[in-house]
Image (cartoon, rainbow, N blue to C red):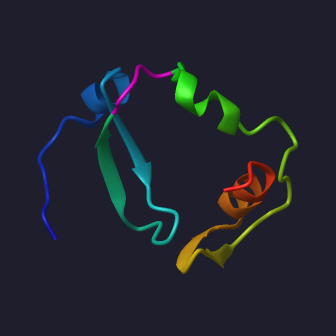
Amino acid sequence: MAGIYANLAQLMASREMSISRTPFNPDIVVVKRASFPKGTVPAHLKGYLIKKGECAGRTGTLIHKGRLVPATAVCVAEKHGK
């Protein structure tokens, strides 16, 4: 697995980069380039916003369209007919 040397404080403060843990292996941290500024939602994704309490209590992973995904993602996909 490839590794990088980075200043964590700069990554956390950056509006172009984000870091997160993978949902399937919490020991792995992923650095991602943001495709849109933090705190904004692109128009094509506004319909997929998860409202407060929507899909609450869904934990774990499920198989959706042949792929293992978080249960919350399956709930949202069902609500949006995907």
Magenta region: which residues? 34-38
In the picture, the quarter occupied by the C terminus is bottom right
> Magenta segment, principal secondary structure?
loop
Name the residue nearer the viewer: 34 or 8. 34
Tell which residue pokes out farthest to the front in this image: 81
- Residue at position x 83%, y 53% from top? 55
In the picture, the quarter occupied by the N terminus is bottom left
Pinpoint residue 5: horizontal percent, then vertical percent: 11, 46
Name the residue nearer the viewer: 2 or 76. 76
Q: Quadrant of residue 13?
A: top left
Q: Quadrant of residue 77?
A: bottom right
**Taking the image as drawn, is residue 64 in sight?**
yes
- Residue at position x 75%, y 67% from top? 59
Side of 28 relative to 25 (left or right): left
Task: Please say whether residue 30 is one of the residues in the magenta stretch.
Answer: no
- Residue at position x 30%, y 24% from top? 16
